[in-house]
Image (cartoon, rainbow, N blue to C red):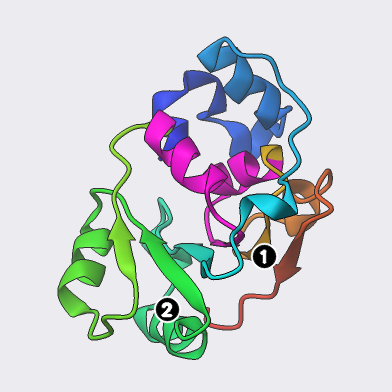
Amino acid sequence: HITSEISALRYQKYKRTNIAKEICDYFKVQLIEYKRKINEIKKDDKKTISIFPVSTSLIRSLPLYILEEIIKNFSNEYKIKIIIDNSDYSKYLLDSSTNNNFIFIYPKSVKSLISEISKTNFGIFIESGPLHIAQCFDINGFLIETSVDSKKLLSNSKNIISVNNNYK
């Protein structure tokens, strides 16, 4: 998780400072306005949906049956990437998933996570770390709301919408 590598983000759940600025400060880069160009995507290439099903809290992680339902409904038209980490829940997903219409991606660092997020066309977010990175790149997607108020998380976002969590 991004918050474990960037100490200024460890308490974001309570502070809610400018997370994009904290990420840029950590990597010592300037925050720039980034817009995807439509012509970067070839007509014959499938667009990518990246799903971030793992949360630091198991109760907020995306249940396997919902993950598989998303894959079943979108894998014919989209390339599906499931972004995991080294958690027990990620190991469970690796061992339990019966669907072969996607690939698991395991970013080994924050830098590789940022690279994966920058390549996606649409993101499905559970955890706020990948969500904030996606906001920096103007990625479209939705946040499945859990215990953190989505109004705070999405206050500066025009491309990501909130979906109520009904699987509590």
Corner quadrant of residue 94 = bottom left
The type of residue carrying mark 2 is Leu
Corner quadrant of residue 89 = bottom left
**How far is mark 2 from mark 1, CA to CA?**
14 Å
Query: Secondary structure beneath disc 2?
Result: helix
The type of residue carrying mark 1 is Phe
Tell me, yes or no, whether the highlighted magenta stretch contains residue 31: no
Give the magenta part as a residue range: 111-135
Q: Is residue 84 above or below residue 44?
A: above
The residue that mark 2 highlights is: 67
Which residue is at 61% across, 59% downward? 121
Farthest residue toward the left?
A: 95
Quarter that holds the N terminus:
top left
Viewed as shown, does residue 25 lie left or right of 61?
Answer: right
Which residue is at 58% across, 24% downward? 23
Viewed as shown, does residue 95 lie left or right of 43?
Answer: left
Tell me, yes or no, whether the highlighted magenta stretch contains residue 127: yes
